[in-house]
Amino acid sequence: MTLQDKLAALGQEGKALLATNFYNFETLSGVLQAANATGQPVILQLSESSIHYLGLKVAAAMARAALETYEVQGWLHLDHGSSVEIAHRCLDAGFDSVMIDASEQPYSENVKTTLEVVKLAEQYKANVEAELGYVAKLGQEQSSIYTQPEEAKRFVDETGINALAIAIGSAHGFYKETPKLQLELLSRIHEATPAALVLHGSSGIPDDQLREAIKRGITKVNLATETKNMFMKTLQEVLRNNEEIDLRKVFPVATASVVKLITQKLNVVSPA
């Protein structure tokens, strides 16, 4: 099943997929152990930074092999692609889905760049995600510039994208205070466009808000910051006053913490 078909089906059911970034074998293993244990499908995401770190071919091959090994239904997605070139490279590498993020460009440029990727992805029958509005990235100030329903409809109609990341009060990274999603606005956006709606920056959003956002039309929930934070904080604790040099003994403890986190998130986002 293609990712676009899966998202469409979930949208009809009022459900969502968890899309989680991975950074190495350990975080990938943790995500898929949780998915296997809960029997839930997942989207595996790679940012450009992770692609540079792991290497595109290695990362894609590792993800595919791991999905098969852990017997999990899943899709491989480029998260926040900054150019048509990186989207093309990922599609050639067998990605099921790519995100082109030109949201910081003027509206007309966002449309132009996104449309180029959509036309490219048609050759691969791949899912395309784009972003409209201001979802603060790491280091940026959070803002109250939200995606508007009319503009969302126009953007989807003009580009033909399958999925749309919207700004409704979330942000990437850690929150300075508990976020409050604009749920009524989400409902209006959902009514305005048939595109699968994506929530970026779910790390730190209370579970009740996530559940309500899914009921109101979110079908893809992105998770990144909490995953790497959980892995690294656990690893740091394990290594404190520890002279162990065998990474095969210390990494599994950090991986286990990722399993616990992702299991909890899957039970919120995709309850059995």
Image: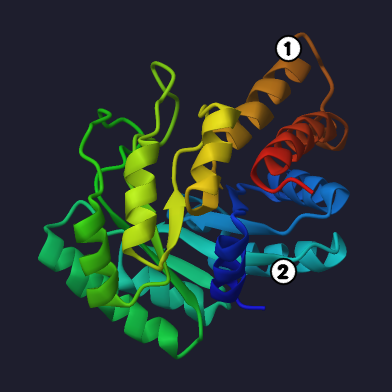
Q: Nearer the viewer, residue 112 or 208?
A: 208
Residue 85 vs 186, above or below: the answer is below
Circle 1 residues within 10 Å: few <14, some 14–19, many ≥20: few
- Identified by mark 2, the residue type is Arg
Q: Quadrant of the N terminus?
A: bottom right
Looking at the image, which residue is at 11% across and 58% down?
Answer: 106
Instruction: Identify the mark nearer the N-term, 2 or 1.
Output: 2
Which residue in the protein does label 1 denote?
Answer: 240
2 vs 1, front mark: 2
Residue 165 tag number = none
Identify the residue at the far top of this view. Answer: 241
- Identified by mark 1, the residue type is Arg
Q: Nearer the viewer, residue 158 or 106?
A: 158
Residue 235: x and y in percent read 71, 25
Residue 272: x and y in percent read 79, 49
Residue 64 tag number = 2
Residue 26: x and y in percent read 74, 44
Residue 80: x and y in percent read 39, 56
Residue 243 vs 149, above or below: the answer is above
Examine the rendering and report whether any part of residue 49 can be seen: yes
